[in-house]
Amino acid sequence: MRACAFAAAVLLVALSATSTARVNAQGGAPPDASDLAEGRRLFEQKGNCQACHGWSGDGHKTDNQMPDGANLRETKLPRAGLVMTIKCGRLNSQMPAFDKFAYSDGRCYGKTQADLKAYPTRMPDPPATLQPREIDLIVDFLLVRIVGQGPMDHAKCVQFWGGEEDVCRQLP
Ligand code: HEC
């Protein structure tokens, strides 16, 4: 009986390790609930990503004066690509660069501010610049709650906000 309980405990530990391992890219601890909540706040407030990408990242922007952002729930970008896109924005598009030094020293696609003038579509200024740590938190949040998660439904919405919110009530 004891051996059986022990085996069950080992199995549980192994299972929880594999379910979180996929987001643990930096070799650091996998994001916990407070990291995810912080990532969501940065996505919503400081980064104002939702203005163009929608609160659930599905591309239904919350501010109709803003450009149409991509559907992040369906992006195929791996972690490194997400980090790069947030830091450097996307050339010739309306996705802003959030790294303070993005086009000052060639760190982004080898380009500087002067090179950007060549593109017909200019990246807008970001609402705020983000520290590398803040970008990692946003990407942790994206990978757990948004990317590849399918359309938002009531259950995911409650988990997303950490409780029953008005926006969740209308969802199936
Ligand atoms: C001013 C509007 C705007 C804001 C603010 C904005 N984005 Fe974007 N984003 C876009 C647009 C437009 C695209 C599509 C670019 C293109 O044409 O490829 C995009 C593309 C992306 C992509 C690439 C998706 C893919 O599959 O290629 C990612 C990732 C992304 N945004 C993340 C973010 C995050 C995270 C934030 C907040 C930190 C943010 N964006 C803020 C407009 C915005």
Image (spheres, rainbow, N blue to C red):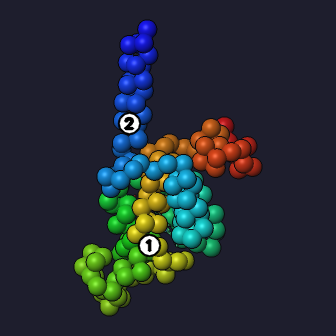
Query: Where does label 1 land, which residue?
Result: 131
State yes or no: discs 1 and 2 in contact (Cβ < 8 Å): no
Q: Give how far apart the Cα atoms at labels 1 and 2 are.
A: 28 Å
Q: Is residue 73 left or right of residue 10?
A: right
In x, y percent, where is residue 104? 33, 86
Q: Is residue 21 left or right of residue 138?
A: left
What residue type is disc 1 on? Gln
Query: Where does label 2 land, which residue?
Result: 17
23 vs 155, nearest the viewer = 23
90 vs 144, nearest the viewer = 144
3 vs 108, nearest the viewer = 3
Q: Residue most toward the bottom?
A: 114
Q: Residue most toward the front?
A: 2
Q: Can residue 91 be seen in this view?
A: yes
What residue type is disc 2 on? Ala
Residue at x 42%, y 23% (from the top left corner): 9
Q: Please tell me whether residue 102 is drawn above or below residue 172 in the rendered image.
A: below
Q: Is residue 147 visible?
A: no
